[in-house]
Image (cartoon, grey):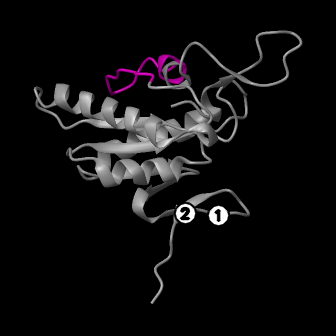
Amino acid sequence: MGGTIDKDYPRLTAGYAFEYGHEPAALRILNTHPNLGISFDVTSVCKKDSLDMSDLDRDMLLGAICKIMEQRQRGSHHARIVITHGTDTMIETAQYILKRIRYNAVIAFTGATKPERFVDSDASFNLGCAIAATSVCSAGSVVICMNGNVVPAGKCIRDEESGIFLAQMETK
């Protein structure tokens, strides 16, 4: 979907703003690890800053998920879907999908606080956590995988001070 994880250095020498690269960050990360125990396909739905996302973009994402699920139903395994997304509206999009999805998939949202191209980016760590989460979460789950936490989308909040994604505490 875009977001910080997919941003790249400016192509122009006078450029100052990060741009979206041609290749999704997830593909670059996965291609650098030759001994993965998974097979994968990477589909780019859009490349947008999450603050610029609308419900039309979320509907496009839902359509892409439905297309994957329809293809997967012909196979024998349930779908494991990882979505890279900007952190500012990741919770909103995950909850949007949670309310509308009618398939028995495991969907994990993840992103990064720094572009994947940066040496000190959390992109690889978060993507790895999301991939692992899809193999252990129950079918029908929509989760957010950030900061080493795997949180059900319906219970996820982001701490305003630290920026960490965590589960909302139940109040009595």
Left or right for 13, reference 142: right
On the image, numbered disc 1 is attached to which residue?
159
Mark 1 residue type: Asp
| Residue appearing at x 60%, y 26% in the figure | 6
Circle on res. 167: none
Q: In the displayed structure, would residue 160 be above or below residue 148?
A: below
Residue range highlighted in magenta: 28-44
- Decide: marks 2, 1 in contact (CB < 8 A)? yes
In magenta segment, residue 41: yes
| Residue appearing at x 44%, y 17% in the figure | 34
On the image, numbered disc 2 is attached to which residue?
157
Label 2: element kind: strand
Locate residue 86, reporting x and y percent.
59, 40
Q: In the displayed structure, would residue 66 be above or below residue 39?
A: below
Locate residue 21, reporting x and y percent.
63, 16
Locate residue 63, reporting x and y percent.
31, 32
Left or right for 92, reference 87: left
Mark 2 residue type: Ile
Which residue is nearer to you in this view: 122 or 10?
A: 10
> In whole angstroms, how far apart are the C-alphas of marks 2 and 1?
6 Å
Locate residue 142, reporting x and y percent.
35, 51
Q: Residues within 10 Å of mark 2 (few under 14, many from 20)?
A: some
Place residue 82 in its image quadrant. Answer: top left
Q: Residues within 10 Å of mark 1 (few under 14, many from 20)?
A: few
- Which residue lies most toward the top here? 12
Q: In the displayed structure, would residue 15 be above or below residue 2?
A: above
In magenta segment, residue 140: no
Q: In the displayed structure, would residue 38 be above or below residue 148?
A: above
Label 1: element kind: loop
| Residue appearing at x 50%, y 76% in the figure | 169
Q: Would you say the magenta stretch is mainly helix, strand or loop?
A: loop
